[in-house]
Image: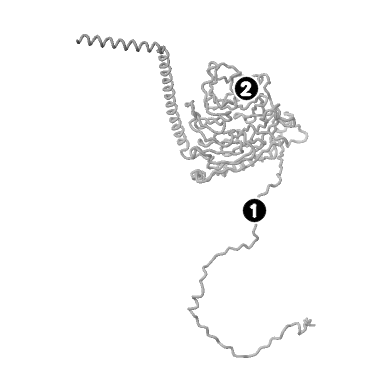
Amino acid sequence: MEIVHVYTKLRSEFGRQCLSSDRTTPLLDVRPQPELARNFVQRSSRDQALQACLEMSEHQVNTKRFESDSRGINHVEGGWPKDINPDEMEQTIRFRKKVEKDESYINSILQLGSVMEHYIRQNNAVDIYQEYFEEEEEEVDESQEPPSAKTINIFRDPNEVKRTVSGLSWHPDGGRKLAAAYSCLEFQKTSKDMSVDSYIWDVENPNKPELTLRPGSHLVCLDYNPKDSHTLVGGTYSGQIVYWDTRRGSQPVETSSVEQSHRDPVYKIIWLQSKTGTDAFSASTDGQVLWWDVRKLSEPTERLVLDPAREENLDRALGAISLEFEATMPTKFMVGTEQGTVISCNRKAKTPAEKIVCTYEGHHGPVYALQRNPFFPKNFLTVGDWTARIWSEDIKESSIMWTKYQMSYLMDACWSPVRPSVFFTVKMDGVLDVWDILFKQSDPTLSVKVCDSPLYSLRVQDNGRLVACGSQQGEATLLEICSGLSTPQKNEKSLLAAMFERETKREKILEARQREIRLKERSRSEQGQEEEARREEGEEDPEQLIARAESDFYNLVETELKRRERTE
């Protein structure tokens, strides 16, 4: 049987009928007319790019911060059978001996030994972390790169009442952590709700502090121990010295007594180079520099009163606000005072009067920062009032280099640890300035607006790449400096040494010339005083002078008459 499908459709649905017929088609011959080309303009070829997808624009939006929390388990020891107590040494030793005698244990160790030996040899043969083009990268000239800095992280004070970040200190092992001291530096502005805690931050986690430091008073400054990365020492607003061991938690291990501590806030504390690694010294506006052994903070080991008259009179002492200690000069240290004077001291002098060696005067306000150049220790940097100044130990009268007066007050400064000619300053208008004195001395090489609030503290990481700035609103901003400002340049050290030597010679010549001028003025004044004394001694009464003149006249007349009589 055959199945057939039939499709039916009405004729009216097919449309109009097509009619075909035969007819002759005329042929047209259109010849070219070159004269018509004058009426046309040839269009040049043009490329036009077309996008097949929708056009989109990029916008930066501040999203809600994602708070992460790192957690882990420290597995110390395990795998023991249930019937064996791991705390009992006899049971564990007995079980080990039993296992070591087992044949399966011996066979598995022998098999694993050959496998381990193979992979150890393989690791020694191939260095998977080797950088093949490291030398070529160093040779690339990075001077063409424009100076720049970008914000990496911002560590905000977690408390509701914000406090000033008055001190910063980098972790000595790689700079993975940043310790920040928080305090209220305005007199009698501390409220009851204000916290006294300070924090240690992990640079990768700005959401939550890694450790909270709980002193008895606000921390004004703190410093990591370069020999022991677990210990810190800090100076408080009450004048006490506080010592922490981070392995023991947030509470301080030891605190100095109020009676034996400073009378004013401790503005700077530094670890000393010693065999024990437990010595530090502090400075305060009460005019004292105190030495401490953190193992026994009941009383200071040594004391120095910053009396410029060298009489150890505390009432006339200059208030210290900054300190400088260089490990290569273990007996020397320098102190910056509230009066704008820098005092050079020698700790090993025999008498207290000899401990104050000399003074440098050049600032109109407190010396907030003081640091020796890490490559040229004879030259040091100071910041006070509206300028930053570079000094030489040999020149007492004036600094050898200085910046022009800024529009805002400078609060802190430090040298770059990798580039001898680069230093950093922070100002009250929230700007971080990076200076390269080999490039130009009149203006900073790079100025970055870090925040709207004043910047009070500054600290550079040991690799010179990361810079931390502390603000009045409790924000510690972490910035990354471009490689051009954080990589040593060719011949930089020799060029800077020549510059320092030239400026030192110039200042010595000017100082000698100024000394000559002062001596001349002094001699002139002494001569003038002698002449005035002579005049005062030789002065007579006017009547006596007239009488003397008359007698002289008559004597001349008489002698003349006698001479004429003789001639006649």
Residue 299 pos. (x, y %): 65, 19
In the visual, does 39 lie left or right of 198? left
Q: Quadrant of the C terminus?
A: top left
Mark number displayed over residue 286? 2
Q: Which picture quadrant has residue 119?
A: top right
Residue type beneath disc 1 = Glu
Please name the colour scheme applied to the rendered image. Answer: one colour
- Element assignment for label 2: loop
Number of on-image labels: 2
Up-down: is 371 above or below 440? above
Residue type beneath disc 2 = Asp
Up-down: is 395 above or below 128? above
Q: Which picture quadrant has residue 83?
A: top right
Up-down: is 552 above or below 68? above
* Residue identified by numbered label 1: 58
Q: Which picture quadrant has residue 57?
A: bottom right
Residue 135 pos. (x, y %): 50, 43
Q: Give 318 or 369, whichever is nearer the viewer.
A: 318
- Element assignment for label 1: loop
Residue 469 pos. (x, y %): 62, 37
Outermost residue to the right: 1
* Residue 291 visible from this viewpoint: no
* Residue 166 visible from this viewpoint: yes
Q: Residue at horizontal 54%, vertical 29%?
A: 363
Q: Give 53 or 557, whichever is nearer the viewer.
A: 557
Q: Quadrant of the N terminus?
A: bottom right
Q: Are marks 2 and 1 in contact (CB under 8 Å)?
A: no
Residue 370 pos. (x, y %): 56, 29
Dot in front, 2 or 1: 2
| Alpha-carbon span between mark 2 and mark 1 | 56 Å
In the visual, does 44 lie left or right of 13? left
